[in-house]
Image (cartoon, helix red, strand yellow):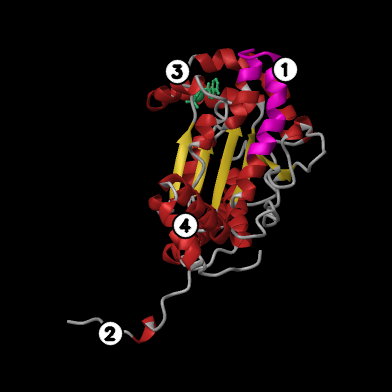
């Protein structure tokens, strides 16, 4: 990425429009308010978004993650959910703390820069570990710069709109890290498995999702997608643990047992989504997720590496700050 440090000063952006020329200024005075607002918005977009956002930063996934390349057919059965990269569990917990510290430092820069944003998407089968990953990886991040959204069965209002409406409304604004716990992919996953819309409709959505993610990328949002890959045996153990522990009963939904019967249908739906929606700007990352400590480490590392590649910069300070004194 080329660095365009500190160009985003709201005052400057507006001044640019207002001082173009006397003719423009007098013209602007006679324009209806909405036209003036559009002109300001256009200037702000031109000034505020890096011009090379079409070339997103390299998202080098941490070792142990399988990244689906565009055009590659995803074969989940060939990816071992037990993989742990030969890492040591205790050492990995220490390493996770170091990756969290990197995320915290880079997040502060992203927030201060106020030009671009990061959207982290998590998808998995029930008990796949989405909540646990979010808790482990984002612990310590300034809550002001990060928002987590969990998507459930659409409300009546959401269902009355196009399928992307509720997701688009929650994409991160400049400077923010946004996290989707479930996402727009539910509309080609659960919706497909339960037959909630005709096949023609969900098939069309792969292309619509690719377009949506491309639009976000062009607008300065880096889209980072993780699929947490667990085995059917591991899901059984996790469901049994929820039944056995009264403190975990709140997490147990008897409907999960019905969903489990559709395991193969879900794997087929994940396979197609990961195959059709791994674009150059937003590839899918498959995370072996039976071992929670391994999952947490490689995801934290990939998020930290992605933020580092984005290379957010503090805005330029006003001149002469270093020499200033604070009056009594
Ligand atoms: P949980 O994440 O366990 O609280 O469950 C949320 C539920 O909402 C899951 O069963 C999802 O499959 C379901 N869900 C999420 N998005 C959609 C959607 N777009 N259409 C139908 N069901 C959905
Ligand atoms: Mg659930």
The 10 Å Cα crowd at callout 2, few under 14, some 14 to 19, many 20 or more, is few
> On residue 200, which mark appears?
1
- Mark 4 vs mark 1: give the one in front: 4
Q: Earlier in the sequence, mark 4 or mark 2?
A: 4
Q: Earlier in the sequence, mark 4 or mark 1?
A: 4
What is the x, y in percent for residue 288?
A: 67, 39
Cβ atoms under marks 4 and 3 closer than 8 Å: no
Q: Secondary structure at mark 4?
A: helix
The 10 Å Cα crowd at callout 3, few under 14, some 14 to 19, many 20 or more, is few
Compared across the picture, whether 132 is left or right of 85 comes to left
Q: Residue at x 72, y 34 (%)?
A: 274
Q: Secondary structure at mark 1?
A: helix
User: Quick check: can you spot residue 174?
Assistant: no
- Mark 4 vs mark 2: give the one in front: 4
- Report if residue 283 lies within the magenta region: no
Q: Residue at x 66, y 51 (%)?
A: 87
Q: Which residue is mark 3?
A: 156
Q: Earlier in the sequence, mark 1 or mark 2?
A: 1
The residue most toward the bottom is: 323
Dominant SS of magenta comes to helix
> On residue 27, which mark appears?
4
The residue most toward the left is: 328
What is the x, y in percent for residue 126?
A: 56, 25
The answer for how far apart the CA atoms under marks 2 and 3 are is 57 Å
The 10 Å Cα crowd at callout 4, few under 14, some 14 to 19, many 20 or more, is few
Q: Earlier in the sequence, mark 2 or mark 3?
A: 3
User: Quick check: can you spot residue 26?
Assistant: yes
Q: Which residues are magenta?
A: 191-212
What is the x, y in percent for residue 248?
A: 42, 26
Compared across the picture, whether 141 is left or right of 278 comes to left
Q: Which residue is mark 2?
A: 325
């Amino acid at each position: 990425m080329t660095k365009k440090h500190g160009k985003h000063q709201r005052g400057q952006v507006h001044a640019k429009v207002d001082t173009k020329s006397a003719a423009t200024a007098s013209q602007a005075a006679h324009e209806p308010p909405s036209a003036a607002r559009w002109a300001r918005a256009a200037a702000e977009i031109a000034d505020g978004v890096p011009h090379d956002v079409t070339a997103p930063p390299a998202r080098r996934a941490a070792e142990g993650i399988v990244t689906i390349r565009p055009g590659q057919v995803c074969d989940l059965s060939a990816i071992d959910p037990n993989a742990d990269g030969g890492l040591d569990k205790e050492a990995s917990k220490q390493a996770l703390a170091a990756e969290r510290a990197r995320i915290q430092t880079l997040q502060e820069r992203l927030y201060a820069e106020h030009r671009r944003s990061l959207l982290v998407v998590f998808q998995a089968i029930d008990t796949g570990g989405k909540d646990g990953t979010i808790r482990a990886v984002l612990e310590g991040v300034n809550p002001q710069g990060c928002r987590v959204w969990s998507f459930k069965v659409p409300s009546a209002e959401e269902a009355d709109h196009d399928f992307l409406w509720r997701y688009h409304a929650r994409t991160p604004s400049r400077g923010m890290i946004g996290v989707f716990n479930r996402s727009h992919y539910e509309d080609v996953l659960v919706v497909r498995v339960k037959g909630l819309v005709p096949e023609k409709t969900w098939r069309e959505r792969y292309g619509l999702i690719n377009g949506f993610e491309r639009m976000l990328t062009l607008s300065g949002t880096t889209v980072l997608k993780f699929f947490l890959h667990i085995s059917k045996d591991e899901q059984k153990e996790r469901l049994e643990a929820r039944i056995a522990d009264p403190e975990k009963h709140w997490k147990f939904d008897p409907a999960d047992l019905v969903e489990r019967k559709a395991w193969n249908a879900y794997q087929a739906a994940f396979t197609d989504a990961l195959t059709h929606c791994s674009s150059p700007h937003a590839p899918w990352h498959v995370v072996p997720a039976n071992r929670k400590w391994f999952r947490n480490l490689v995801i934290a590392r990939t998020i930290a590496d992605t933020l580092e590649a984005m290379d957010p910069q503090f805005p330029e300070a006003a001149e002469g700050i270093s020499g200033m004194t604070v009056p009594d």
